[in-house]
Amino acid sequence: MNNKIVRNMHIIGTIFTILFGSLLHFTFEISGYWKPLALISAVNESTWEHLKLAFWPTIIFAIIEYFVYGKKYKNFIFGKTVSLYAMPILISVIFWGYFKIINDSLIWDILDFVISVIIGYLISYFIIVSKKYFKTWKAISFLLLFIIIASFCLLTFFPMNLVIFKDPITGKFGIIR
């Protein structure tokens, strides 16, 4: 298999995730607060809800990638899993890092999102094309995928009383409407 295909798909995936993730910021409200859409859309302005904006488009694109080339790469599942954990961690670290230094702004929020998505896709690419086979991690990846998918599904509807889940505008948690 040609690594050029993997590279090109990662470039397309990065663009897809940035554009589709940006759209997901507004889809819950546009839908008239349709509850099933809350699974993948931001339902408030909390950090947690913004993490979904990178997560779900990446999952959707990873499914496409799997059928295009993923079956042929031993590290595909592991690479995507690391990427799916890296993006929310990076978004959080960058956000909470700059938020403490400068005032929150839309430009910094967008840059945080874009940088985190780019780095997440780069991590995925380098793991997938690596000559080293991460056999043990591949098996663990399925459990880690289940955990993160379940977390994103459940914690939208049942958020914990932690600052990451708190809407800074309303002071409330979870689905506001």
Image (spheres, rainbow, N blue to C red):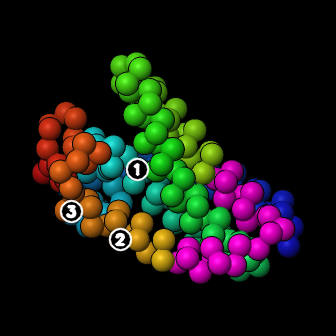
**Which residues lie in the magenta part?**
121-142
| Type of secondary structure dominating the magenta stretch | helix
Please give left or right for residue 154 compared with residue 99 in the image.
Answer: left
Occupied quadrant, residue 9: bottom right
Disc 3 marks which residue? 157
How far separated are the C-alphas under marks 3 and 2? 11 Å
Secondary-structure class at tag 3: helix
Residue 136 located within the stretch drawn in magenta: yes
Give the percent coordinates (x, y) of residue 29.
24, 48
Q: In x, y percent, where is residue 69? A: 73, 73
In space, the residues marked 1 and 3 are separated at their CA atoms by 15 Å
Of the 4 image quadrants, the one containing the N terminus is bottom right
* Residue 24 in view: yes
Which residue corresponds to mark 2? Answer: 150
| Residue plotted at (29% across, 45% down) | 164
At label 3, which amino acid type do we have? Phe
Residues under numbered marks 1 and 3 in contact, where contact means CB atoms less than 8 Å apart: no
Toward the viewer: 176 or 148? 148
Which amino acid, by three-letter code, is at mark 2?
A: Ala
Q: Secondary structure at mark 2?
A: helix
- Pointer 1 or 3: first along the chain: 1
Residue 163 x %, y %: 25, 42
Which residue is at 14% across, 44% downward? 172
Q: Residue at x 72, y 58 (%)?
A: 125
Task: Report whether residue 19 is seen.
Answer: no
Crowding at dot 3, Cα within 10 Å, few <14 / some 14-19 / many 20+, comes out as some
Quadrant position of residue 148: bottom left
Q: Which mark, by number, is residue 30?
A: none
Earlier in the chain: of badge 1 and badge 2, it is 1
